[in-house]
Amino acid sequence: MIRFTAAGLIIACLAAGEVPGVLAIRGARVYPGNGPAIDKGTVVVRNGLIEAVGTGVAVPADAWVIDGAMLTVYPGLIDGLSTWGIPTRTTPTPAPPALAPAAPPARGPEDRPSTTSWIHAQDQVQPNDRSVTEARNSGYTMAVTFPTAGIFAGQGAALNLAGEKPGQMTVAGSTGMYISTGVRGTGTGFPGSLMGVIAYIRQVYIDADHYAAAKQTYQAGARGMRRPDYDRALEGVLESPRILLPASRRVEMERMIRLSADLKRKAVLYGGHEGFRAAEVLKASGVPLLVSLRWPERARDSDPDQKEPLRALEVREGAASTPAVLAKQGVKFAFYSAGVEPPELRRAVKKAIDAGLSVEDAVRALSLNAAEIHGFADRAGSIEPGKIANLTIADGDLFQDRTRIKYVIIDGVKYEPAAPRQEATP
C-alpha cells in the first residue's frame, strides 16, 4: 500500500489540481450530509466518484492516503443561489440618437420586457472568474448559478467550481428559472409596479401554456395546419423545471406560494429572512426556501439618532433563527450567498448555529438540501458511494473562526486553498 503524509502527497503528485485516480482519507471525522457524523471514518475516492465511506472501510492497495486524524470531512459545500462565475452584465453604451433612435417603452406582455429566459448559466460562466477561485478557497465545491438581470433573467445550472471550460464544470443544466419582481420598467413602460410585474408573470405563463398546446397539436398532425411561430422566450420558460420566486417577508412568501399554485409550477422561494414567522405556511405548502446569508443589519451610513420601525428591529433580531425554526418544522431549506464575500460565509452560517441550528442541519443546508431542492441529489450533495467526489476538508469544526480549509476535492481532483495573506506589521 502506498502511504504518504498530506504534505508529502502534495509535493509528490499535486500540481495545480492534479490527483491520482484513487485517494483515501483515513481516520477522519466525517459528516456525510445524509446522517450523523462518523468518528474515525474513511472516505475512498476513485476516478472522481465516492467509492466507499464508513468506519470499517478498507483502504485500497493502490490508494494515496491522507491521514485524517486531525481532519474533518464534509460534503462539498454548495451555494444554493449564486452568480459566481458569471461576469456582471453591463448595459452597453447607447449609440447616438441619429444612428439608433430610442426604442419605445414596452406597451405590454407581448413585448416581453426584461425577459431573457433563453439564457443558460452554463453558457455564461467563465471558469477563470475570480469569484470561482475565491469560493473554492473558502471550501465551496459547487454553486447553483443563475443570471439575475431582469424579470425572467434566465436558467440556472449546477456548476462545479473547477474545470478549464464550462462543459467540465456543468453537473446539471436548466435547474430553474430565476424570476425577480424588483424590475419596474423605465419611464411609462410596462410593467410599472409590483402589480404590473406579477400580472406580466401570469401572462407569460398563460402564453407558455397556449404555446405548448399549439405546438403539441401541430406535431400531432401538421398537414393542413399553420405552424406556430417560434418564441424563444416561451421556449426558455417551458424548459425550466422550476421557478425561483423572491420572498423575504411573510406576506411575500404567502403571495408567492399562491402565485406558484395558480401558475401550476414547481416553485422555490429565495430570501427568507422572515421564515421564522412563516414556517407553518411553508410547511403546509411544501415549497422549499433558499435562505439568504446576508443577514439584515442597520445601514452603516444611517443616522444613529433616527428611530427604526419596530418590525425592522424584530426581523433583524429574528432572521438568524429562521434556519433553526425551519429545521424544527421540517421545512426544506438551503443557504445561499446573496453577495456575501466567500470568506465571510462560514461566519454567517455560524450566526444561524448560535441562534439554535444544529451543526448537522447546517451542513445539510450547505450540501444535500441544495442538491435536493434543485434536482441533482442523485449525483451530488452527500458523501455516498457512486456520487461525485466533492469534499470539503477542514482541520476542525467548519464553523469555528480558527478552523482552516485544508483541502477541497472536486470531481476527485484535490486542491489546497492558498494560505490567508498576513498583514504587514508597521
Image: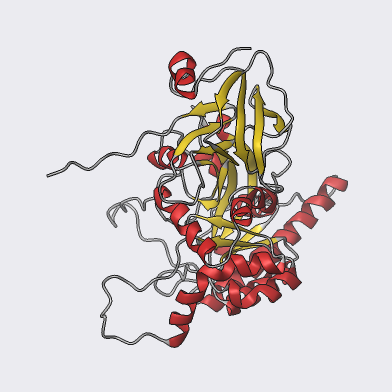
* Count of numbered labels shown in the rendering: 0
Q: As displayed, is residue 297 above or below residue 237? A: below
Q: Is residue 344 at least partly visible in the picture?
A: yes
Q: Position of residue 368 (x, y in %)?
A: 66, 48
In the drawing, does residue 159 fall left or right of residue 94?
Answer: right
Colour logic: secondary structure
Q: Position of residue 253 (x, y in %)?
A: 62, 73
Q: As displayed, is residue 283 above or below residue 102? A: below
Residue visible at 72% across and 37% down in the picture: 384
Q: Position of residue 24 (x, y in %)?
A: 62, 25
Q: Position of residue 88 (x, y in %)?
A: 40, 49
Foreground residue, 132 or 109?
A: 132
Residue visible at 29% across and 70% down in the picture: 300
In the drawing, does residue 243 fall left or right of residue 401?
Answer: right
Quadrant into which the C terminus falls: top left
Q: Is residue 109 at least partly visible in the picture?
A: no
Q: As displayed, is residue 339 above or below residue 86? A: below
Residue visible at 70% across and 50% down in the picture: 372
Quadrant into which the N terminus falls: top right
In the drawing, does residue 161 fall left or right of residue 424?
Answer: right
Foreground residue, 195 or 113?
A: 195
**Quarter occupied by residue 335:** bottom right
Q: Residue furthest left?
A: 426
Q: Residue furthest right?
A: 221
Q: As displayed, is residue 13 above or below residue 258? A: above
Foreground residue, 39 or 78?
A: 39
